[in-house]
Image (cartoon, rainbow, N blue to C red):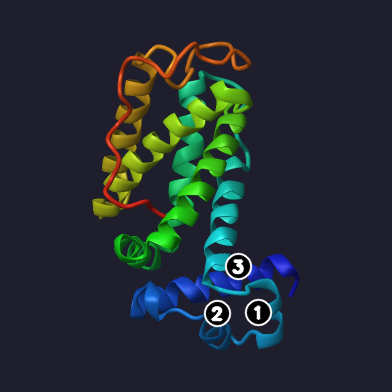
């Protein structure tokens, strides 16, 4: 078993444990035992639960960026990339929902995930051919984070098999960003930063920061 397989097995076990006990009941050691993984290697690769979450977010990014299209509009590319990220979360849905329920009472974890999610949104922008560099890129990353949070809010309540409500929420959020001149930069030259944060407010954020 290579490192990637080890990480995937431990993370899957941790989120299965979260589904049963809630995120506060998860330990790396127990996740390793449940998956039949050596504790020494689990300790080395995952010093704590935060490491599990950060590695999970990295895996979600990789899943989203794999096969990213280099044709079509920026909006269409972002839609495809973010839905692939949602599809990755869907594989661990019960555990991810358990984590999301925990975050309002765990501000330290919420802040860590917020920072990681902002970094991830930069990668999503780059995957769609939109620059995330400089001040303009930072603003676009924050704008896309608002889109992501809005979409996660819909996904949290979406029990359909085809995730149609989630896709509709994402499309609505991207459309709103598209209408807000300069807010996200959709339809603009990727390397040109927006002149300002835009006059239209992004979609409202959920009360708690979701997972990366």
Q: Are the residues tagged 1 and 2 within 8 Å (C-beta)?
A: yes
Quadrant the N terminus occupies: bottom right
Q: Is residue 146 above or below residue 85?
A: above
Looking at the image, residue 192 sits to the left or right of residue 208; the answer is right
Instruction: Name which of mark 1 and mark 2 comes first in the sequence.
Output: 2
Of 62 and 119, which appears nearest the observer? 119
Judge the density around disc 2: few (<14), some (14-19), many (≥20) Cα neighbours within 10 Å. Answer: many
**Residue placed at 39% from the left, 81% from the top?**
25
Judge the density around disc 1: few (<14), some (14-19), many (≥20) Cα neighbours within 10 Å. Answer: some
Report the Cα–Cα distance between label 1 and label 2. Answer: 7 Å
Indicate the position of residue 62 as horizontal and vertical percent values: 61, 48
Q: Which residue is mark 2?
A: 28
Count of marks, rendered view: 3
Q: Which residue is mark 1?
A: 42
Indicate the position of residue 152 as horizontal and vertical percent values: 34, 47
Q: Secondary structure at mark 3?
A: helix
Q: Quadrant of residue 33?
A: bottom right
Q: Quadrant of residue 135?
A: top right
Q: Secondary structure at mark 2?
A: helix
Q: Which residue is mark 3?
A: 8
Instruction: Name which of mark 1 and mark 3 comes first in the sequence.
Output: 3
């Amino acid at each position: 078993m290579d490192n990637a397989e080890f990480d995937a097995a431990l993370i899957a076990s941790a989120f299965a444990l979260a589904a049963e006990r809630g995120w506060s009941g998860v330990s790396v050691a127990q996740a390793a035992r449940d998956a039949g993984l050596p504790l020494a290697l689990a300790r080395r690769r995952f010093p704590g639960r935060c490491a599990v979450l950060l590695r999970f977010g990295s895996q979600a990014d990789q899943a989203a960026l794999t096969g990213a299209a280099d044709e079509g509009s920026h909006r269409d590319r972002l839609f495809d990339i973010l839905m692939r990220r949602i599809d990755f979360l869907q594989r661990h849905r019960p555990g991810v929902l358990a984590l999301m329920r925990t975050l309002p009472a765990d501000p330290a974890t919420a802040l860590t995930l917020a920072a990681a999610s902002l970094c991830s949104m930069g990668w999503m922008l780059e995957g769609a051919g939109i620059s995330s560099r400089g001040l303009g890129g930072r603003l676009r990353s924050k704008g896309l984070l608002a889109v992501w949070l809005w979409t996660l809010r819909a996904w949290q309540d979406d029990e359909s098999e085809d995730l149609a409500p989630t896709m509709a929420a994402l499309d609505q959020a991207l459309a709103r960003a598209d209408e807000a001149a300069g807010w996200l930069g959709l339809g603009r030259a990727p390397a040109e930063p927006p002149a300002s944060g835009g006059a239209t407010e992004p979609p409202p954020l959920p009360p708690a920061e979701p997972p990366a």
